[in-house]
Image (spheres, rainbow, N blue to C red):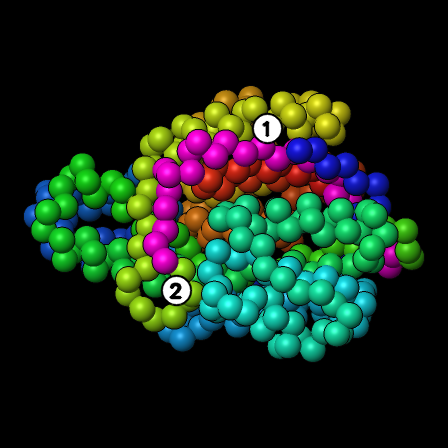
Amino acid sequence: MDSIYKNVCIESWCFEPAPELLSSLRIEELLLPTYERLGLPEGRLELMSGIRERRIWPKGSTPSDAARIAAKKALAASSIPPSEIACLINCSVCRDCLEPATATIVHEGLALSRNCISFDISNACLGVLSAMIVAGNMIESGQIRAALLVAGENSRSLLESTIAKINGDLSITRKSIKRFFSSLTIGSGAVAIILAAKDRPLPVRRPSLVGGSSLTASEFNGLCRGNEDKGMGDNLDTLMNTDSENLMRAGVMVAAETWEHFKSATGWKNEDPDLICTHQVGSAHKKLLLETLGLPNEKDFSTLQNFGNMGSVSCPATFAMAMDAGRAGEGAKIALLGIGSGINCTMLGVEC
């Protein structure tokens, strides 16, 4: 599916990192019994992933808590008053509960209008990019004038349950431990993005959402599976099973096909993007992705070293950090490259 926009801009953005730091070395210290039993070398986790550290929220934090922090800052940075936000979409993998929508809890905490529709979009690590398409279409059609997209992800429960499982299961071998490896790379954070119509007076120039393309390769939906959704509480039985190597290869293959659709839809060429913001999975994944798409590494903005894979927060947070760092001046073209388990792939173009 292709999407092209003429009247949608990114009004404001905010990335809010979780406050507690957890290094890869500390995770290995917690896994010391298993490391010693299997003869695994110290430093393996950072060496294989490129992730030095990630962050987690304090115990008892909820996705809505995290999302509201980022949302309030994005609203404060926007020229649009909260009363004019007509759509709120919560996009995270983590949710407060199965019912009601976490978006309704965020909505209450922000005191948004009753005329602001609120709902969740769940699409693994592509949640925010998927919501940008949905909200962008609503703005482009004239149905609404502004939308707030939020996501709060917390890896605490997943990390703790994975460490407990690895140390407690003596049947795990050097080979079978690989299916838990991806869970140890997950980080936490929150992001908020406000999309708005461009045909109004703007106090400053805003980046335009150009459009993009999305593809689905559902034959690979079994390569990464999480268990029953239990929100972001303090339970220790939230586990994921990931075939990392095959997921990486299949994901990059789908991304290569999506990239060709993206270039056809937007008219961009490989040399056009001035800045590349990817879903930050790991160093091997990023290297293979950029090489396969024929994109130069120097245009990539990397955040995985210090934040890990933050799920749906990852790609938009990378965009937010790059913008705040001044990496995209006026006229710059930015490629947002997202891949999510399923497998789904969405690529969006932004022009400053």
Q: Residues within 10 Å of mark 2 (few under 14, many from 20)?
A: some
User: Which quadrant is home to the C terminus?
Assistant: top right
Q: Is residue 212 above or below residue 227?
A: above
Numbered circles on residues, count: 2
Residue closest to the eye, 283 or 238: 238
Q: Which mark is residue 258?
A: 1
Distance in Å between CA atoms under marks 1 and 2: 32 Å
Segment tinted magenta in the rendering:
202-228
Q: Is residue 184 above or below residue 4?
A: below
Q: Position of residue 94 (x, y in %)?
A: 46, 60
Which of labels 1 and 2 is toward the front? 2
Q: Which mark is residue 239?
A: none
Q: Position of residue 78 (x, y in %)?
A: 76, 64
User: Which quadrant is home to the N terminus?
Assistant: top right
Was residue 205 drawn as part of the magenta stretch in this picture? Answer: yes
Q: Do residues under tags 1 and 2 come within 8 Å of each other at their CB atoms?
A: no
Q: Position of residue 194 (x, y in %)?
A: 71, 58
